[in-house]
Image: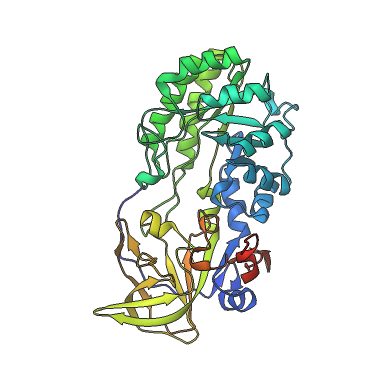
Amino acid sequence: MTTAQPPEKPRLRTTIAGARVADLADTYGTPLYVYDAEMIRQRCRDLAAWDTVRFAQKACSNLAVLSLVRSEGVMVDAVSAGEIHRAMAAGYPAHDANQPGPDGLPPVHPIVYTADIFDRDSLDAVVKHGLHVNCGSADMIEQLAERLPGASITLRVNPGFGHGHSQKTNTGGEGSKHGIWHEDIPDVLRRAEWSGLQVSGLHMHIGSGTDLAHLAEVAEALERVAIEVGRSLTTISAGGGLPVPYKPGEVHADLSGYFTLWDAARKRLEDRFGHRLRLEIEPGRYLTAESGFLITEVRAVKRQGSRKYLLVDAGFNTLARPVLYGSYHPMSLCPKDAVEVVEDVAIGGPLCESGDIFTQIDGGFVATRPLPMAAVGDLLVIEIAGAYGFVMASNYNSKPLPAEVLVDGEKHRLVRARQTPDDLIRGERV
């Protein structure tokens, strides 16, 4: 990806996927998450070269989104009992892996449970539904064998290095809890054999925002481990981490180069093993980030010394990425009246926290953005918010979770109702 950062231009926005921003806010209230269905479809189709596209639903797990990607032939990854339940509620079967894939490819698992542990609920769900497991810790092997003897498993391997747009999203190397350490693979293979489990898959994911140079290292590392595992392998997974452009000057990943790199590794392994291998990719943010928009209303305009603030009705309880990672999101204004003046402003939320700032950089320092001059009642649109947006939302300050809306062609519909005050205290006792 290019690192050049030309100055950001002030933005006005009146529509999302053809629907008027003002109409969406009037109909469903704010703050409001809005998803563009056609953008999700396009991102699914971008990856058609891969044998299997498996959505990491932790990025955006609304049932309507899961159903949409399922209709595009995308399989799903689950990291909890709750995500298993969601996948099945969205129409994914527990398993239909008895049918061989096309062109001699091994069968595909509709739902794969991927984690570094089994909590008790997750293990129960995996056993109940006979789900395939991607094991990130060796201890999972005996735990699964005791409950589901004879199962096949995938190993998630930590190759000893990682990459990410933030250290908190780096999922490889000694600083990461994820995956089985690459030097432990021989011991893990023995434990699997003693437990009566077959290692049929290999998965390697080192973090988000990787470039082709890092991906080439991952492919080489996976190939080395695959040779250790041997001919029992039927599937290799490139993991996820495909970047999307958030900042001006950033571009999409070279998808053709990415596939070519992994396909070459797959073919070398097929030649060695003498049978076909299924090649999977596991995108999360790539499928949904650009489809998502957070509409929020300007509720106060104030000046603190030389800096001007717009305070909106969404906070880090609504979108946590800026406060967690210093993440950048493009922003645009939907004003009630025509605007010509542009000014640099900081954008903050309603929470009783100094860190409740959307225009902060890594380290928590407040930054500003050029935006058309705003007034109370105008709408601010936070863009590229479809990944790790709603799914990380909370009830901090007893704020209700926002509504979610799907725009599909000329229609838009509510796909999650806004929480009510009664929802906030449901289950509590005096």
Q: Please, is residue 414 above or below residue 254 in the view?
A: below
Q: Please, is residue 351 above or below residue 283 in the view?
A: below
Picture coordinates of residue 373 (x, y %)?
38, 82
Which residue is drawn at the image coordinates 37% and 39% (left, top)? 163
In the picture, measured across the screen, residue 293 lies left or right of residue 146, that is left
In the picture, measured across the screen, residue 397 lies left or right of residue 212, that is right
| Colouring of the image | rainbow
Q: Is residue 235 visible?
A: no
Which residue is drawn at the image coordinates 39% and 55% (left, top)? 324
Quadrant where the C terminus sits is bottom right
Identity of the residue furthest to the bottom in this view: 337
Which residue is drawn at the image coordinates 65% and 69% (left, top)? 422
Picture coordinates of residue 364 (x, y %)?
31, 60
Which residue is drawn at the image coordinates 48% and 70% (left, top)? 314
Picture coordinates of residue 288 (x, y %)?
55, 53
Q: Please, is residue 172 above or below residue 428 in the view?
A: above
Residue 280 vs residue 31, the one in the foreground: 31
In the picture, measured across the screen, residue 235 lies left or right of residue 167, that is right
Q: Quadrant of residue 22?
A: bottom right
Q: Is residue 236 visible?
A: yes
Identity of the residue furthest to the left in this view: 306
Q: Quadrant of residue 257?
A: top left
Count of residue discs: 0
Residue 386 vs residue 80, the one in the foreground: 80
Q: Please, is residue 360 above or below residue 225 in the view?
A: below
